[in-house]
Amino acid sequence: MASRIYGWLDSRLNLKPVEKTLLDEPIPGGASWIYVFGSVTLFLFVLQAVTGMFLAVYYAPTPDHAYDSVRFIESEVTFGAFVRGLHHWGASAMVVAIGLHMLQAFLYGAYKPPREAMWMAGVLLFLIVMAFAFTGYLLPWDQTAYWATRIGINMVGTVPLVGEFLMKVMRGGEVLGALTLSRFFAVHVLFLPALIVGLIALHLFILRRVGPAGPWTDERATLGSETFYPRQVYMDAVAIFCAFLLVAAAALAIPLPLTDKADPSDTSFVPVPEWYFLFYYELLKYVHGPLEPLATWILPAAVVLVMFLWPFIDRNPARNPIRRPVALGAGALFLAVVLSLLGLSIKNLYAVPRADPAVARGKALYAEFGCAGCHRIHGEGGAVAPDLSYVGDVRPDRDWHNRHFKDPQSVSPGSFMPKFPLTDQQLNDLTSYMLSLKKAP
Amino acid sequence: MSGERDPSVEGGAGFHTPVGSRRTFFRWVTTGLAGLIGLGLAVPLTGYVISPALKRREPQWVDVGALDELPEGEPKQLDHVTTSRDGYLESRFQKAVWAVKRPDGQVSVFAPMCTHLGCGYHWAGGEKQFKCPCHGSVFDLEGQVVAGPAPRPLDPLPAKVENGRLLVIFKEFKSGIAQRVEL
């Protein structure tokens, strides 16, 4: 049936040459598993585009509704959490895939003449993906989104002369608010997609004009070519399928709870950026005072510029890594710095808050004594007594809690909280739980 | 591999491509994996889009007023505020119903829209009839069609009395057809 339809169309549209162009593209040296990362990246982009379109079905880009609409997707819509998970982990997977794709192109010297323009279009694509990540992060409008974006925008403010102005343009005014959310939304779902589709087309057009680079061997004349279809397509499909399985598994297995709704007045919230910005976040910790602009924009701008112009900086014609010690050394050093900063940052973030068993026991006591009847923690519980969501920040004093639980009126005159018959162990556990309720872990 | 002679490969050292069963194998694996990905996306995404259509709102009893305020045998329009969930929005809006207290104490409640095209009708006290201003449909006190294009009697709503308060479940029905189809 399909072949009859194809035959009918072919007899009119002359499709055979198109098919030949698309599928019989010669791969120098034959198909290889090392060439799959470009296709995987392209697939993940399509996955992002599709899941993004579906998220937009329910999402509302205003501060009044954004948070509620995302929570609605997460908890009410059938498969909503899965679709949101695919989009979230798809973004991470895309960054990984691009990283591997660039690494492969770098290692194989695929940016060397005549493929400079392909590399440069690739660097621009990478920057657009980062812009996607930055603009998309604000959209759920929870505390993390709000404060991380605020910090990101503030960094732009350190650029001399135009920084302040750029910041206002990004925010759409003086404050991060309704105008910021709607422009981030428009950029994320309309402007950037238009841009990236054009650049992907350019990237692929250049690829088809100059052809893939193939192995780094010097005796290129002896290289045979294999057609793109079917073996390279098959390898790409297997890699794409693995990427899809990983993203889908993460979407199913790892819940993505929203933090509290964005609260611009809550200045003590400490946001953590996405892991792919963490190395940069770590770098900013080491550079202070007059040197800060070095980290906030001079270094990033220099790195991006060097990356973009790399085909013209590295003039060594050899593609074999053994004969490119300087380029490989520079690449390895850059990678080592980025990865160590990333590692350091992850270690700092996750190593510190050791799970204290007393906190878990205290949490169980909180439930057992029905504290939620009056108190509220992150929107759960009654509203007649003080909200305890961040009581560890408000009352960091252990002794105060101990005295308060024994006799609330002794430290808080007029309080209508009853005295609870607690053992010393229970007292200690409950206090530990209270002290753990903080904005930043 | 370019120098080897392999019956499953076509072409010479310069340009080659797998043929025969090898080629078929690659094609099937590629098609199969693409199909699996497509299925893995199509099923959740379809559910995602149609899910609101499959969800039924829970009927909710709403207090529309005290029974004492209802005159016997004389229909009265009762306004009330209902809270409804509209996706992620919780909105409150005014709804009206027509209620008639019978001599035996039973209360009939009608949806406030004419069954013809959904206009709001009113009670003509002198003629003891409900009249729709749009196309002249006329109903009696029982909601039966007396005149005009209305295809069915007025739509009754579930009602009950608790502690002297009248409770109803508000519903809307498709207009213009003889059957009563809830929206």
Image (cartoon, coloured by chain):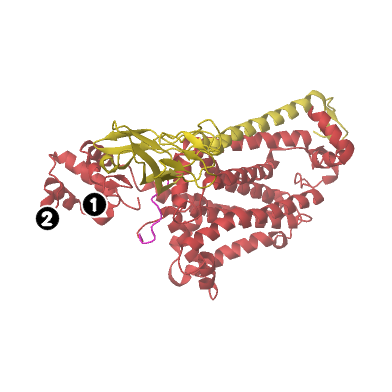
- Which residue is more in the foreground, A346 or A405? A405
In the image, taking residue A18 as reference, residue B181 lies left or right, namely left
Q: Position of residue A173 (x, y in %)?
A: 49, 69
- Which region shows up in magenta? A258-266
Outermost residue on the bottom side: it is A161
Q: Residue furthest front?
A: B126
Q: Secondary structure at mark 1?
A: loop
Rendered yellow, the chain in question is: B
Query: What's the residue type where badge 1 is placed?
Result: Pro
Residue A420 occupies which quadrant of the picture? top left
Residue visible at 88% across and 34% down? B12
Residue under label 2: A413
Image spot of residue B59 (x, y percent) = 40, 35
Task: Find the distance from the CA under tag 2 to the CA under tag 1.
Answer: 14 Å
Please give the chain letter of the residue carrying mark 1.
Answer: A
In the depicted structure, whether residue A102 falls above or below residue A287: above
Q: Nearer the viewer, residue A37 or A438?
A: A438
The chain containing the residue under callout 2 comes to: A
* Residue A426: percent from left, percent from top: 18, 39
Dominant secondary structure (helix, strand or loop) of the stretch shown in magenta: loop
